[in-house]
Amino acid sequence: MLCQSSTELMELVTLVKPYTKQGKVANYIPALGRANPSDLSISVFNIHSSKCQSAGDISVRFTLQSISKVITLALALVDHDEEYVFNKVGMEPTGDPFNSIIKLEMLSPSKPLNPMINAGALVVTSMIKGGTVQEKLERIMSFVRKLSGNNDISYSEEVAISEYNTGSLNRALCYYMKQHNVLDANVEELMELYTKQCSIETTCFDLAQIGAVMANNGTCPITGERFIPIEIAKICKTFMVTCGMYNASGEFAIRVGIPAKSGVSGGILGIVPNEAGIGVYSPSLDEKGNSVAGLKLLEILSKKHNFSMF
């Protein structure tokens, strides 16, 4: 399926392009630091017409990073159930950075507040069924391929190695949770899986199609096949509203008002419930880890089309 160019979206990309000069790429992960900061692209998939419109260079591939947290949460809930998952991970937003350890030290038991911060995502990833790291990774990638309709999706070995070698803070989160019996996985195996999960490569078009499935309550708008149970899709979208944009989720809810999940590669997965899936990419980030131009693009688009759910 092709994603057609849109004059309206091209005008918005041109309008927002100067914002790519603000912020900086995520160079604390060396492989991500090589991204072109001027890149900006968007795809919007309408679930009623099953048509996609785009602007910018949507052929540019980027890694999911924290966007993958939504996908692994859905898969973990399919593998287990709500009681099992949320016995280990909470449901509350946090005002702390996504990689903070402070709440783990303050709470008893020391379980992560939600699945969208790194500590919570690591616990969720540890729940994915499979006998080996490769089996679990293949299940995650197979799920991403199904949701996106793209069977060619894989992961960037370069980015995965870069993240694995610089993941000391994530290891610290794992060992802290293991000490307090929240996590029982082998830490190095979990780190291998988690960094490969975050390194799965997609385009804006792929994200828009994933968002369209979520917007359609877990059903593929093209084939009518159910990929995610309705209740699980609802849980994922709720977490995206309350926690999806790191510790800027409240401001995003006011300015844009749709479920969304960002990643430090510069990608944003957006969902207009019962309407559309949106994929945005621009790698220059603000201090909270969100795409500067991507945020502005979604804000203008939401106001123009009254996308806010509030």
Image: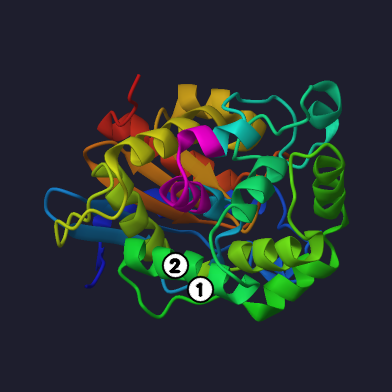
Q: Tell me the colour scheme of the image.
A: rainbow
Q: Residue under label 2, please give it.
A: 203
Q: Disc number at residue 138? A: 1
CA distance for labels 2 and 1? 19 Å
| Residue appearing at x 55%, y 66% in the figure | 130
| Residue appearing at x 79%, y 27% in the figure | 103
Going from the N terminus, do you reach mark 2 or mark 1 first? 1
Q: Secondary structure at mark 1?
A: helix
Report which quarter residue 43 is drawn in: bottom left
Who is closer to the viewer here, 272 or 161?
Answer: 161
Asked if residue 56 shows in the view, the reply is no
Q: Amino acid at mark 1?
A: Glu
Q: Secondary structure at mark 2?
A: loop
Who is closer to the viewer here, 102 or 130?
Answer: 130
Give the vertical position of 215 relative to 103 (above or below).
Answer: below
Q: Amino acid at mark 2?
A: Thr
Determine whether, in the image, residue 277 is placed left or right of residue 120.
Answer: left
| Residue appearing at x 70%, y 24% in the figure | 95
Determine whether, in the image, residue 179 is placed left or right of residue 211.
Answer: right
- Of circles 2 and 1, the one toward us is 1
Mark 2 and mark 1 residues within 8 Å of each other at the beta carbon: no
Residue farthest top in this picture: 310
Residue bounds of the magenta highlight? 72-84
Residue 269: image location, x then y, percent: 45, 49
